[in-house]
Amino acid sequence: MENSESYNLTGATLAEIEALAAEFGEPRYRARQIYSGLYRRRLRDWDSFTDLARPLREKLRGRFTISYPETVRVFVSSDGTRRYLFQVEGGQRIESVFIPEDRRDTLCISTQAGCAVECLFCVTGKLPMRRNLTAGEIVGQVLALQEDRGADSKRLNIVIMGMGEPLLNYDNVMKALRLMTDPLGLSLSTRRITLSTSGIVPGLQRLAQEDLVPNLAISLNATTDEVRDRLIPINRKWNIASLLDACRRFPLEPRRRITFEYVLIEGLNDAPEDARRLVKLLKGLKKKVNLIPLNPDPWVPLKAPSEERVLAFQKILHENHLTAYIRRPRGNDVSAACGMLAGREYPNEDGTHHPPAIAKAGLTTEGTMSTEKKMFGVEDNNSPAE
Ligand code: SF4
């Protein structure tokens, strides 16, 4: 553990806090009191740790803060979805999305500020990759949400599908997962946590060896390497065959399935032949498919298919006994839907959250649009206004 006056203790493990207690000459059980105060009781200042003697609290205050990502703004959608815009150390903006439903709540959290994967259909991929989030910043999003909403842990599902590719920030994500699921920590059920990846095969192989394995979602989105290369550039490194091979080897508990996410894009991956190929590709896997009609965004030079075409795609999957759900967007009026997270703060005059807002936030898109244009021969009509 760092020896700094302003070290943020959020994200520290029990073992790290035990080492700290030993350094302070305190018995081991003190570490449990601190750990429980941080994650179970969500205490935010050392004075609230009334089970610790005052001199110890003073020592802790002298060296440690208890910080969550700072809430810059919360955007509330007409459907109740809440988009949290956070600022983390260094000034980067990240986002979490809280989606309340009848029987459960879902929190979508980020793992990186920006993303290097550059999926063509995703606004986050248009941002420059700034940095990995620390375990404290990842788990801090959950703590901040619980502080704001008092969200009941038993109703709370966590989806690691926000900004960033979690398997490219492997160690911090795993550390955060352990804090979330530790019965002495946040005590969330592993079964209620889903990690989504764009297909980082070595990360999947590593995850398969862990004693703690969340639900797995694969952002597949194409049925040929030709199309997937364009949609998710890392497919050139780990193609569909190698990705599905890693999925087949992935250990699944009984009754657990891999979710394959399939963003439907007009004219690219929404043809009946795609649906039939998808059935073949996923044969033998324990799976379900989430069909996600593309959420239109001015930064994304692609369109969603018609409702008719989406239903026809689903019908082919159903006829072939493949469980497939159509995921309707939540919170898209506040840029909170799937693929729309970009740290956008200021609504435009028309109430939307378009690229000029990103420019105001000091972010740049340099390089990304030109890559897309080269791939697709897309004209410049969709370029962000300056
Ligand atoms: S979909 Fe995920 S992996 Fe792809 S660019 Fe967006 S955040 Fe990154």
Image (spheres, helix red, strand yellow):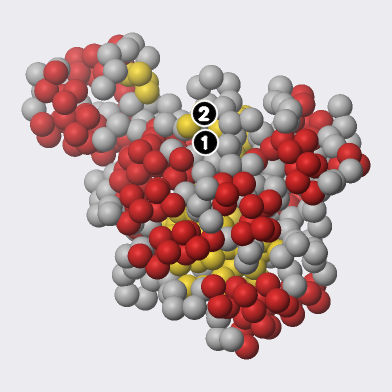
Q: Which mark is residue 133?
A: none
Q: Residues within 10 Å of mark 1 (few under 14, many from 20)?
A: many
Is residue 296 visible to the viewer in this orientation of the structure?
yes
Q: Which mark is residue 112?
A: 1
Residue situated in front as seen by the camera: 176 or 85: 176
Q: Quadrant of the C terminus?
A: top right
Residue in view at x 73 percent, y 77 percent: 272
Find numbered disc 2 in the image and state the secondary structure of the residue it sits on: strand
Find numbered disc 1 in the image and state the secondary structure of the residue it sits on: strand
Residue in view at x 64 percent, y 52 percent: 229
From the viewer's perspective, tell me whether residue 153 is left or right of residue 145. left
* Image-quadrant location for residue 13: top left
Tell me which amino acid carries mark 2: Arg
Q: Is mark 1 within 8 Å of ligand 1?
A: yes
Residue 324, above or below 98 = below
Residue 285, above or below 125 = below
Marks 1 and 2: CB-CB under 8 Å? yes
Residue 312, above or below 252 = below
Q: Quadrant of the N terminus?
A: top left
Q: Residues within 10 Å of mark 2 (few under 14, many from 20)?
A: some
Residue situated in front as seen by the camera: 33 or 346: 346
State the residue position of label 2: 131
From the viewer's perspective, tell me whether residue 341 is left or right of residue 16. right
**Dot 1 or dot 2, earlier in sequence:** 1
Residue 382, above or below 333 = above
Q: Position of residue 85 (x, y in %)?
A: 62, 35
